[in-house]
């Protein structure tokens, strides 16, 4: 029997990416796709590339209110933060539906950190303790039993997957970590702003939200601190590059005494053995290596004569950084083959 799934905010960039994956997933039946601004509009009018890919009965966008009258097996929320927590609440209350939230609403365990970072009161702080951070390879066991999975941010996924095993095993020191990350423009969502408009992005390269201003930093710090067993306060500088999709993070770390780049590779190989979507590689990875795939790839280089290592990590922000990892989490939650619909 197929599992029924609904998508809230299906008109956005992560929504359409998710639908592209779901229409090929053999264990899924799409129950509905929702939109507030385009209720009643055929999905194929919004995204003609998906014409004839949705069953006739669900090919028109429905309102969030109509969606909330249903109880599918799973709901993916592709809504912005704040809107998402309110929208998924009826599903969490119906006693059946399990939710994968792509927004940041349930990513931070600490309510005060969330409220400071996102500058509004958390709509449902009572649910924070029960939400599971959906970094699939790291929290797989807790994801299996979860009703609410908070899908990680795109930059955090690219930084956490290479660093967490190294902190857990004491291969790198928790001090002086620096993540220097570059993202394609789809990371900012569908609506163009002055910062993401083609005219200003094309043939341009810029840093933004430096020195602790970016909202992904508390998420990165919380997860690294958990892996380290004590506070970690990395530096994180995001950049915008003139490409559609992809993230490359260059991470600078100090090796623990006596450790080398070979220990980094050994820790990765141990942590990610038989995990197809977290892949240590020898050659320096490039964003094009993982375009439209659910893989995060990373490599290490040690600075000769020094205890510094440089980790280079890449992923597709729309796939492993968002909708692909969401589907991976869905597969884990429902006991399906983890790679289903993703290879
Ligand atoms: N883009 C990425 O690389 C990425 C990566 C990881 C996580 N995320 C997160 O995933 C979520 C979706 O991101 P996205 O890039 O897909 O955003 P998006 O392209 O802006 O799409 C969001 C959709 O949500 C709907 N929406 C907007 N405001 C709403 C509101 N107040 N109430 C109800 N619906 C609203 C809109 O649909 P209608 O106008 O049709 O109603 C819109 O199409 C965000 O929380 C984002 O932070 C994004």
Image: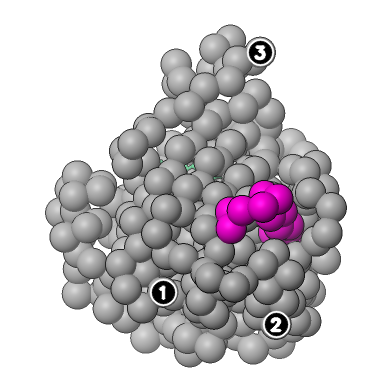
Is 149 located above or below residue 81 in the figure? below
State which tag comes first along the sequence, 3 or 1. 3
Is the CB atom of the residue marked by disc 2 within 8 angstroms of ligand 1's nearest atom? no
* Left or right: 286, with 70 as reference point: right
Q: Look at the image and give the residue range highlighted in magenta.
A: 294-308
Q: Which residue is mark 1?
A: 228
How many angstroms separate mark 2 from mark 1 (CA)? 17 Å
Residue at image position (80%, 61%) is 281
Residue at image position (51%, 76%) is 170
Residue at image position (72%, 76%) is 266
Figure quadrant of residue 286: top right
Figure quadrant of residue 119: top left
Query: Between residues 235 and 85, which one lies in front from this camera angle?
Result: 235
The label shown at residue 205 is: none
Is 1 located above or below residue 164 in the figure? below
Is 204 located above or below residue 109 in the figure? above
Q: Which residue is mark 2?
A: 270
């Amino acid at each position: 029997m197929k599992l029924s799934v609904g998508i809230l905010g299906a008109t956005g960039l992560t929504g359409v990416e998710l639908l592209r994956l779901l229409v090929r997933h053999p264990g899924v039946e799409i129950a509905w796709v929702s939109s507030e601004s385009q209720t009643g509009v055929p999905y194929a009018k919004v995204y003609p590339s998906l014409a004839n890919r949705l069953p006739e009965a669900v090919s028109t966008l429905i309102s969030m209110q109509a969606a909330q009258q249903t109880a599918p097996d799973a709901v993916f929320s592709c809504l912005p933060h704040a809107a998402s927590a309110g929208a998924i609440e009826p599903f969490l209350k119906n006693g059946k539906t399990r939710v994968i939230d792509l927004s940041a609403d349930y990513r931070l365990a600490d309510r005060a950190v969330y409220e400071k970072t996102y500058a509004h009161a958390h709509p449902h702080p009572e649910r924070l303790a029960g939400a599971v951070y959906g970094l699939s390879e790291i929290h797989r066991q807790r994801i299996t039993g979860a009703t609410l999975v908070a899908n990680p941010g795109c930059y955090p996924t690219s930084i956490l997957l290479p660093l967490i095993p190294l902190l857990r095993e004491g291969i790198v020191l928790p001090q002086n970590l620096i993540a220097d990350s570059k993202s394609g423009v789809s990371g900012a969502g569908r609506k163009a702003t002055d910062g993401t408009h083609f005219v200003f992005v094309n043939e341009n390269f810029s840093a933004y939200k430096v020195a602790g201003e970016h909202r992904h930093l508390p998420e990165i710090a919380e997860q690294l601190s958990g892996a380290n067993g004590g506070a970690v306060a990395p530096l994180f500088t995001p950049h915008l590059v003139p490409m559609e999709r992809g993230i490359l993070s260059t991470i600078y770390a100090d090796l623990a005494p006596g450790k080398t780049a070979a220990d980094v590779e050994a820790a990765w190989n141990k942590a990610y053995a038989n995990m197809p979507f977290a892949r240590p590689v020898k050659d320096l990875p490039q964003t094009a290596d993982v375009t439209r795939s659910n893989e995060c790839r990373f490599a290490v280089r040690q600075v000769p004569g020094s205890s510094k290592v440089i980790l280079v990590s890449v992923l597709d922000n729309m796939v492993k950084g968002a909708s692909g990892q969401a589907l991976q989490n869905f597969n884990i939650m429902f006991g399906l083959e983890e790679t289903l619909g993703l290879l």
